[in-house]
Amino acid sequence: MELLKELTQAQSTSGYENEVRQIMKKELDQVCSEVLYDHTGSIFGKKTGNTSGPRIMLAGHMDEVGFMVTGITKDGFLRFTPLGGWWDQVLLAQRVTVITERKKFTGVIGSKPPHLLQPEERKKVFPIREMYIDVGGHSKEEVEKWGVCVGDPIVPICPYERLPDDDTVLAKALDNRIGCYMAVEVAKQLDGMDHPNTLFAGANVQEEVGLRGAETSPYAIDPDIAIVLDVGVSQDTPGTSSGDIEHPALQKGPLVTFLDASMIPNTRFRDLVIDTARNNNIPYQIEVITGGGTDAGKIHMYKEGVPTIVIGAPIRYMHSHVSLASKQDIENGVRLLVEIIKRLDADTYASMINYK
């Protein structure tokens, strides 16, 4: 999975997605007749099957959770703010890359050392506002001379690795470079294959800070149907599941989201997805969550409404420096998406939106 490795190692937090966008363009150029952009930087490759069929939007998101420099102390330490949702407890002592206009700097997230904490302080989680990033500078003037500025993006560091089972992938930014990877792979697998629609495969910007690219990109594509590619929480680690019902887990198949805080999917589309998985013997898992949302929350409300579903893969340790995913879940997700797109013709689309 060299493409997934390349995508996860790219450094692209919200609002600074250019590294991933360039990879997406390189890959989509190989199999698509045209590459489109919206005015916020979202990117999609157009692949025409049957122009009388519906326009299908296949959308991951390019950004990963990261940070931004908000200030430099007189002693040369960086103050920062999160871009996306972070849990303070996972940050201390982690390495990061500070990306300036001229150069990239490695830093470490620090705070008051435990040896100096009062007993009551030891019982609390240190808040981000009391942390800093140490890039080895000794004064504000020195760090500014290096080119570090307020507004520079900061990205976690974590090498890509395949674990000993030869299935588990360890990397940063699996949320949501998995969606980017799946979009490109579906376009590649459909290359030279008939499909009864026009496919727009790509990814949005700034999902982690409010689904912003998903609000603008439909105007560049004008989709009839949308499939959002994202990840879900794998609840197969100690303390994450209640045990009385089945929960998402690695190696049990791609996720199909039936409910989140931003969308209830078109039920006819949902049923078609499940039917497709069953008919093709593709394992799948159902995700039902009451919090959080995806780009589908914006896309499905475009114009009169767009039948939309979320399909992705479960991952462990989301929104941290490192996550784990299953290669077979991702590959089965691509298989499912290809089979779904082969079924989305004009009559199927009409059946989804006919409420008379």
Image (tube, helix red, strand yellow):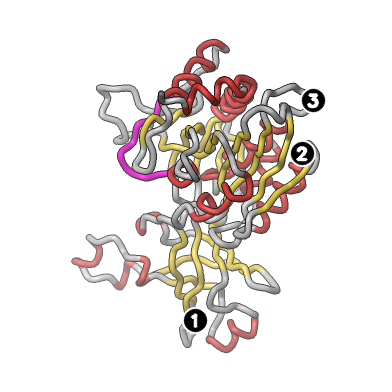
Quadrant containing the C terminus is: top left
Q: Of 133 and 123, which appears nearest the observer?
A: 133
Residue 206 x/y as whole percent: 52, 56
Instruction: Please name whichever residue, 336 or 35, is drawn nearer the observer in this view of the structure.
Output: 35
Residues packed near mark 3 inside 10 Å, few (<14), some (14 to 19) or many (20 plus): few
Q: Which residue is mark 1?
A: 72
Left/right placement of residue 201 relative to residue 176 reads right
Label 1 or label 3, whichever lies nearer to me, is 3
Residue type marked 3? Gly
Q: Which residue is mark 2?
A: 32
Identify the residue at horizontal 48%, vertical 85% (top origin).
Answer: 75
Residue 64 on image: x %, y %: 53, 53
Within the image, what quadrant is residue 160 found in?
Answer: top right
Q: Secondary structure at mark 3?
A: loop
Magenta span: helix, strand or loop, mainly? loop
Image position of 92 (left or right of 349): left
The residue wearing badge 3 is 192
Mark 2 crowd level (few <14, some 14–19, many ≥20, 10 Å Cα)? many
- Tag 3 or tag 1, which sits nearer the N-term? 1
Q: CA separation, marks 3 and 2?
A: 11 Å
Placement of the N terminus among the 4 image quadrants: top right
Amino acid type, callout 2: Cys
**N-terminal of the two: label 2 or label 1?**
2
Q: Is residue 250 above or below residue 123?
A: above
Q: Going 51% across and 82% down the picture, which residue do you hit?
A: 76
CB under 8 Å between callouts 3 and 2? no
Region rendered in magenta: 285-295
Label 1 Cα neighbours within 10 Å, binned few <14 / some 14-19 / many ≥20 = many
Helix, strand or loop under label 2: loop
